[in-house]
Image (tube, rainbow, N blue to C red):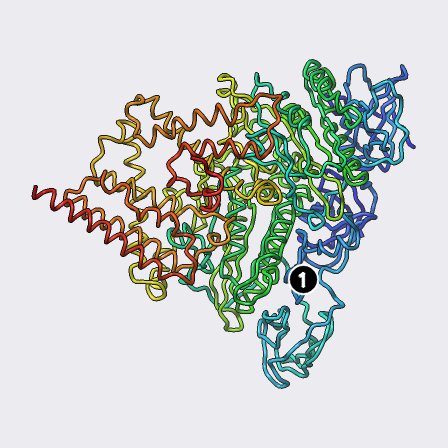
Amino acid sequence: MGKIIKISGPLIEADNMENTMVGELVRVGNLKLTGEVTLIKNGVASIQVYEETSMLQVGEDVTPTGELLSAYLAPGLLGGVFDGIERPLDKLYGLEGDFLKRGNNIDRLDTTKLWGFVPTKKVGDRVSFGDEIGFVMETKYFAHKIMVPQGVGGKIKSIKSGKFNILDKIAVIEDKNGKNHSVTMLQKWAIKTPRPYLKKHSPDIPLITGQRVIDTLFPIARGGVCAIPGPFGSGKTVVQHQLAKYCDADIIVYVGCGERGNEIVDVINEFSSIIDPKTKESLLNRLVLIANTSNMPVSAREASIYTGVTIAEYFRDMGYNVALMADSTSRYAEALREMSARLEEMPGEEGYPAYLASRLASFYERAGSVENLNKTNGSLTIIGAVSPAGGDLSEPVSQATLRVVKVFFALSSSLAYSRHFPAIDWLQSYSMYSKNLQIWFENNISTEFEKYRTFLLKILQEESNLLEIVRLIGADSLLNKEKLILDTAKIIREDFLYQSAYDDLDAFCNLKKQFRMVEAIYHYYDKLSYAVNNGVGFRELEDLNVKTKFKEMKYIADSKINDFDGILQQIDDEIDAKLDFGGEDEKL
Amino acid sequence: MKSYKTIREITGPLIILDNVEGAHYDEVVQIELKNGSTRHGRVIMVDGDLVIVQLFESNLGLSPTNAKVKFLNKPLTLKLSPEILGRFFNGLGKPIDDAGELFAEKEVDINSSPINPYARDYPSEFIETGISAIDGLNTLVRGQKLPIFSMSGLPSQELTIQIARQSRLKNKDEKFAVVFCAMGITYEEADYYMNNLKGLLDKTVMFVNLASDPAIERLATPKVALTCAEYLAFEMDMNVLVILTDMTNYCEALRELSSAKKEVPGRRGYPGYMYTDLASIYERAGRIKGKKGSITQIPVLTMPEDDKTHPIPDLTGYITEGQIVLSRELYKKNILPMVDVLSSLSRLKEKGMGENKTREDHSGVASSLVSAYSAGVNAKELAQILGEGALSPRDKIYANFATSFEEKFLSQGFYTFRSIEQTLNIGWELLSLLPKEDLKRVKKQYIDKYLKN
């Protein structure tokens, strides 16, 4: 047992700690605060304390636990709200009331609740690490698979069926040396070690989010990595929430890292109010929420990210598609900086430690579309928000993130000021998955999908060039076909890209409808180009009635998807009328 | 309680003591001088028997030989009782009016534990401030933290006072209180606030640290004020409005202390942990499940060089739920209150808008007004470069809209109260200036119901 010899904020030093390990979980002081050993020098351990250290005294005890800082993995995770080191905030609220107290070492998962365990393996079967031996229906529709923990493998000697808590022995496995290992539903996993898999695939299925600007223009792949940087007020959190609510992953792990307490409540409220169309249950049943809000101890920021990703990997190992939202990774980086400064390490760029880039890269690398040890396929998609200081992407966290991610949503404050949401800047954002996903879109939506996607991007790019000219010499000098580009771009921006997160019909837009919307716009542009090239003046085309149809397009219900045929027809009719008229005009 | 005379070093706001036994981190110390005066400080590091103390007051006149340091074995606390209303304190929570010591019912650590996020209740009740730019476009809700980003030379205090004076909740039976926390402001400014809060005197608690008071003291002031606010809100069931002014002075004091501690400076010399430190203040706003009271914060800060990307407004904006940005240009045009609605934002506005809260059409009207104003401002900029003649007919409509919007909607002065209905009706009047097919953000049924032509 060690004794505290130095206290400086969340960092303490204790002597007499020769036998401790780096990364070991320790209990600090009379209050038994949770801490983690970060370095050991001449028997003195530096310990990062995950709770407020106020009124701690030199000379108090430090007790090692012999365990690395680990996540507890078992049925009971879904729908839970945990702090950065996986303490259940919902249960703490019941026990301690409104304010968080210190030194509470309660069970992280409920150890008394009984779960109905259904074995899928029988006595005599050979199993190894990661193999499924049975499952528990954690919610009505979610099968929580129970897998063989690490370090265990061999022949099943006995396996039970029935109701058990997570600490009960449900099976005994005999290894090749004849030694018996009993298996419970609870596993522990050191959060800083990635959980293993057999191999990684290249991601080729999109994660469908129902957000038009994302799915159509900048798609995310299942197992991909995506960053959302943006200045404050540009809607990072709203985009994260939309993705969490509507993306078609089986499990969502949402890490609120150093952000507002109210946002956590918002996530809980929103998720409980939305009913999953597939299962008819509240979305809360597919969510694990990790909350280390900005007024909770800064030292637990880093742990919150790792706890989240470990839980996400655990569900991936069962063969599910998991999405992890981390809001915001900048707060995690700042926590690294703060701890690094207290450890008196040599600072790198802007005071961040030199290992910032490698830590971020190794975190994002835990995403992927993989074949698991038990031969199932699963994926873990990571979507990280970045909060660059002053909105300037040249700062180290943004730069280190951009080097590893494949999808980049640039949130722009000028779009946010003009209340264009999602404020994803179409000129700067990119998705490097669009090529990988092309085949999927061709097979599942339409062979025209890629053509329309490039059409949208081209018009938007040309619009930006033309607006430069307009700014210099005014709109009058533009050619008819250039005016048409501006007109089409406006429709794309206002009627397609603009999507209200607060409108019931518009908040989620399925892929088929997205495709029909682009198709209508493409058809409009195509038809009008033809008319313009055949001498119809743009002024005549400016106020077609069909434009009001575009305005209402996003409110077309999924059941009335055939209404789009009517819009295409109306475009044809109106333009043909102009063409006929134009023709007569020429004759005269 | 142990006393020590082992001061080894006095540098700026820090004193270092030797041979101290069993000091607690974060403990308060009382420094007694030979002449009988006392000062206070707090332990910020313990290393074996060496202790570093941060003073809350001036170090003038201190010497290693004339001072005795007493360790009080408790963190900095504030005495509380229902009689605190109407009282006047210094930045550390010591009464400075003539009413004497407060008869304390309880004594609370000013650092308070964080609210369990699970215990929070989402802010969603509309607060009517009677200011169109806020109620109409950047709706304030109970339990929100909404800062005012001011600039030097703008009368931000008039807007702040207008909010404090006019704010009303839908249910008028509920109890209301103002906690006013001044950090490093001038006597004149503090006096302005005091005179104007007179009408609310029996519902106001003031904590004042003036520009002439020690800068280090103001690091404790917002925590003291918020401890009082938490007491009023969560134990006395009051809806508390906390005004924190000026956060820029607070951050500068933080920088001063950080440089005295020889820490690695972050952006513009502010410490790397400023985000966390500010969060520990701003996050103390909110509502708690099952409690009647609430804490709504209006921090005021002055943007150095009018720069929104300066670390103080930048970090604040990342923590708070929106911001009200003031505009020098509008002030010069005498459009008062001078709120720049394009860069202002209330993140919780959608929660406070709509049927049963304000009016069903609110959200659509707000979004239409801002996007049309934004288009109008762009058109006006274009006209400045190319001349009005170069504007398309559509651009002209929008340019005119922007002008009317500023004159009719934004401009109302600091003494007019507009109900939310009045605000929305002015909004519709302005929207009628626009081509009807451009009203894409309002539902058709509301256009039919409210738009007059």
- Front residue of A391/B68: it is A391
In the displayed image of the protein, which residue is found farthest to the left?
Answer: A587
Return the x and y of residue B181 as percentages of the image width and height: 72, 26
Return the x and y of residue A419 as percentages of the image width and height: 46, 39
B259 on left or right of B449: right
In the displayed image of the protein, which residue is found farthest to the bottom?
Answer: A124
A283 on left or right of A117: left
- Front residue of A304/A256: it is A256
Q: Which chain carries label 1?
A: A
Which of the 4 image quarters holds residue B178? top right
The reply to whether residue B255 is in sight is no
Tag 1's secondary structure?
strand
In the displayed image of the protein, which residue is found farthest to the right?
Answer: B1
**From the image, which quarter does the C terminus of chain A lie in?**
top left
Return the x and y of residue B77 as percentages of the image width and height: 82, 33
Residue sitting at 56 percent across and 30 percent down?
A: B132
- Front residue of A403/B114: it is B114
The number of discs equals: 1
Q: Is residue A292 above or below residue B130?
A: below
Q: Which amino acid does label 1 sit on?
A: Tyr
A503 on left or right of A453: right
Q: In this view, does B27 lie above or below A64?
A: above
